[in-house]
Amino acid sequence: MEKKGKYQISSSVDDEIIEIVLTGEFKEIAVEELQNKVGDIIEAKGAKNVLLDIRAFNGRASIIETYISVRHPLPTIPKVNVAVVDRPENAAVISFLETTAQNAGRSLKCFTDIDAARVWLKSKQKKS
């Protein structure tokens, strides 16, 4: 687990799915920094399916930060299938994230149920 400031990133690989869990506080970091760290993990593990669990991550990027990060991603982040798992109270934000990602041609789907996210990612494995 990597620690810096007030957030933590942990990762594991299960059934060819990289599971990345973010905990801590969002407001203490820059979106680009977080993107770089997650991108580094994805690249190092080499899987094509990523489950990003942000349920224990407090705070969210603004709508404009979300839009910019999806429409103009960092070149170091490989194109992968991403399932984002968040709390139900963040439904509006994750809905915007999913729509923006799909409009940008990215394979990203948002969930509030981690098991449903895993099922979706496994269905993407079968198509590869």
Image: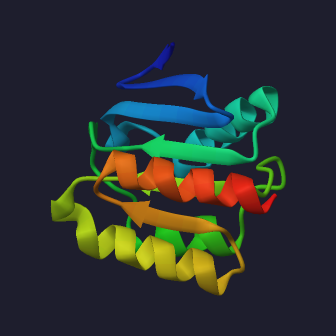
Where residue 99 appears, as percent x and y from the top left, is: 50, 82
69 or 56, which is in the foreground?
56
> Residue at image x 27%, y 36%?
56
Where the C terminus falls, by quadrant? Answer: bottom right
Tell me: 38 left or right of 109: right
Which quadrant holds residue 40? top right
| Residue depicted at x 80% and y 51% | 78
Residue drawn at (62%, 49%), measured in percent from left and top?
Answer: 32
Determine whether 103 is above or below 95 in the image.
Answer: below
Of the pair 36 and 98, the residue shown nearer to us: 98
Q: Quick check: 115 above or below 25?
A: below
Across and down, in percent, residue 73 comes to 71, 62
Foreground of the two, 119 or 9:
119
Identify the residue at the far bottom of this view: 103
Residue farthest along the left direction in this orientation: 89
- Across and down, in percent, residue 44 comes to 79, 27
